[in-house]
Amino acid sequence: MNSRRYYLDYNATSPLSKSVINWLQRGDFLFGNPSSVHSTGKKSKREINLVKDELYQRLNFSEDTFDLFFHSGATEGINTIVKGWAKSLQQQNLIGHFFYLSTDHSCVHNLREELLLDGHKVTMIDVDQNGDVDVDRIIQLLLESKDHCLINLTWVNNETGVCLDLNEFKAIKERTDALVHIDAVQSLGKIENAFETISVFDFYTYSGHKFGAMKGVGFSFVKNSQKIHPLIRGGGQQQGMRSGTENLLGIMSLKFALGDLFESYNYEQLFSSKHFIEEKLKDLLGNEGEIVGRNSRLRNANTIYFICYKVKAHTLSMALDMAGIDVSNGSACSSGAVIPSRVLLSMGYSEKDATSAIRLSFSPFLNLEEAQAIWSTLEKVLVRFLAK
Ligand code: PLP
């Protein structure tokens, strides 16, 4: 058996990128509090501003149109934006209507109850069997609402890899008054045009640990015409948007990780390497399984989500783990019971299939040679199950 381990769970989190590791090894860290007025503090402040400049520039946002704030990751960023928007409306005795897709991340889905308790409205929009959603249907729902609307759109789905073509979704801004939040967490290193962000929407959220930066740091761009009620109050750091001393080293790691991606990411190479594994897998599965979202309009270049009809995901992921491959399964375990994937159920899959899905999510730098090596190990495990 090959003794090498293959980490195929990049949608869950990524290892630190090379430049982040080199910087950590050098050990010459700034430590001053960026809010302090002395030189040591000012140095940290300057560094944070440099990172900000880099994020604006690399991700194609204008400083004239967008504010940028750092937080602990996308869960906090999205909570801040959605709850902050709702709270601002509440203070004006207005009702908000929040829309999201049934395949969105739990940090979006689980805001539902709190918003409803506060008297707002929430509509979950179903996707089809391929994970796609029709923009005209969304526009119709938004136009029918009499309240102030905010919709969350997940650019690249973390579980299925199905993407939204944001060019199509610009029509929401053209034809409705709704505000739009883009969950951009899974875009960097996974699609072709993540650095050419279409910046017509109102809010965008990213998370560092998904693209080689440290855990516990993320950032959101907020259109400066939008005044969001802050989630976290305290010393008023970051123009009051997010109080608390900034996570300086985490913030600095964003710049290094983004730089590595910007310099070395090769979409074609990633796409063709993933394609190699996917085609082999499709042939091997035959009619004993399927690849989720294969007929969707747009998919990312790093994710293969597949179902083996006769094998529970838990069993297969354990076997893969023992063979040296880290994967994720869509179903969750709670108190010993396996809960089917909410995302797959919402795409119309049966409970049985929704507990039988395995997600492979690859490094942005996957190449064909590695893909061949991965396939050789993967195939050996899969044939044991498929032949039964
Ligand atoms: N949104 C998407 C699409 C995600 O994939 C994740 C994490 O898996 C999140 C939000 C939450 O990100 P974080 O781990 O930074 O809180």
Image: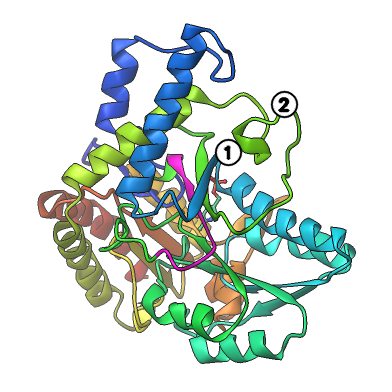
Q: Position of residue 260 (x, y in %)?
A: 24, 38
Whether label 2 lies within 8 Å of ligand 1 gets the answer no
Residue 9 or residue 319, whichever sits in front: 9
- Give the extent of the magenta segment: 199-208
Q: Position of residue 133 (x, y in %)?
A: 50, 84
Residue 214 vs 129, above or below: the answer is above
Check residue 222 for magenta coloring: no
Q: Is residue 236 left or right of residue 42?
A: right
Looking at marks 2 and 1 on the same chain, the residue that comes earlier in the sequence is marked by 1
Q: Locate residue 324: give its quadrant.
A: top left
Residue drawn 18% across the image and 43% down it: 263
Q: Residue furthest left?
A: 369
Residue 72 vs 350, above or below: the answer is above
Residue 375 or residue 43, whichever sits in front: 43
Image disc number at residue 235: 2
Residue 193 vs 215, above or below: the answer is below
